[in-house]
Amino acid sequence: MRHLTPLACAATLALLAFVPSQAATDDIVSSNSAASATQDAAAFANAEAEMEFADPTQEIPCPSFWQVRPNPSVENSLSYVHDSGKLAISVTYISDQSGSEVSAETFSRVAAEQMNCTLPVKSNLLNHAWAFNCDDGLEALVYGEPGNLVLLSISGRNEETENYLDGFISFLSYQSRRN
């Protein structure tokens, strides 16, 4: 398991690109809940127009064999798709604007209940993260400090893609240490 600093990771990843808000702030789970990573890859390819909103002078960090674009469905979110098209991950920074500073555990419980997913459990992928699974194959991990959370939405995780996911988590860990 790895420990990621949410603010450093979010600052490096989710906030490097200006993403126009096209969803209500309540709609915090990305469109990656779709049926498959193939659909995610297709949506990813159609997001070319969104790149015009990104600052062209700043490059969004991206690991080898992955592609990244701002997630057009969720504010402060980036979508990563592995070159194989078999694994898609959205990284979303969630700032608590209500002032209540909700914990990762509480946020994951509410999100899982609203999406009719499994009850959250401690993640075996990240330290201090809470994970839940949905019937459509979406896996979500929530981690961070109260009021400053990061949501990873993973589509396409299986034995074949586990190495890709491990590499991506290593990339996030490296990015969080850099900042």
Image: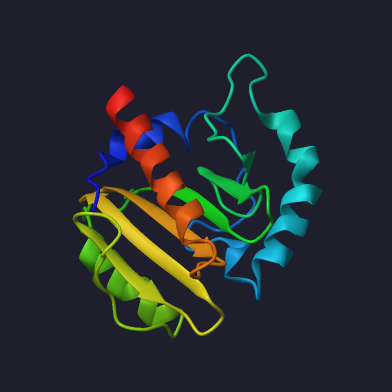
Of residues 119 and 147, the one drawn nearer to the viewer in this rendering = 119
Residue at image point 56% right, 60% down: 30
Query: Would you place residue 174 above or below residue 3 in this image?
Result: above
The residue nearer to you, when weighing 49 against 59, is 59
Residue closer to the observer: 24 or 40: 40
Residue furthest top as drawn: 57
Task: Name the quadrant containing residue 130.
Answer: bottom left
Residue 93 in sight: no
Check the picture and name the quadrant holding the C terminus.
top left
Q: Which residue is depicted at the point 45% across and 69% down? A: 139
Does residue 58 appear anywhere in the picture? yes
Residue 86 quadrant: bottom right
Residue 6: horizontal and vertical position, in percent? 29, 41
- State which quarter of the image contains the N terminus: bottom left
**Apparent side of residue 55 relative to residue 162 in the rendered image (left or right):** right
Q: Is residue 33 above or below residue 92?
A: below
Q: Which colour scheme is used?
A: rainbow
> At 73% across and 39% down in the image, what residue appears?
50
Q: Looking at the picture, how far across and down is residue 20, in whole percent?
A: 63, 41
Residue 52 lies left or right of residue 9; in this view the side is right
Q: Quadrant of residue 122?
A: bottom left
Residue under the image location 32 percent in, 68 percent down: 131
Could you say where residue 41 lies in the image, as x and y percent from the top left?
A: 72, 56
Left of 116 or right of it: where is 42? Answer: right
Q: Where is residue 105 in the image (x, y as percent from the top left)?
A: 22, 66
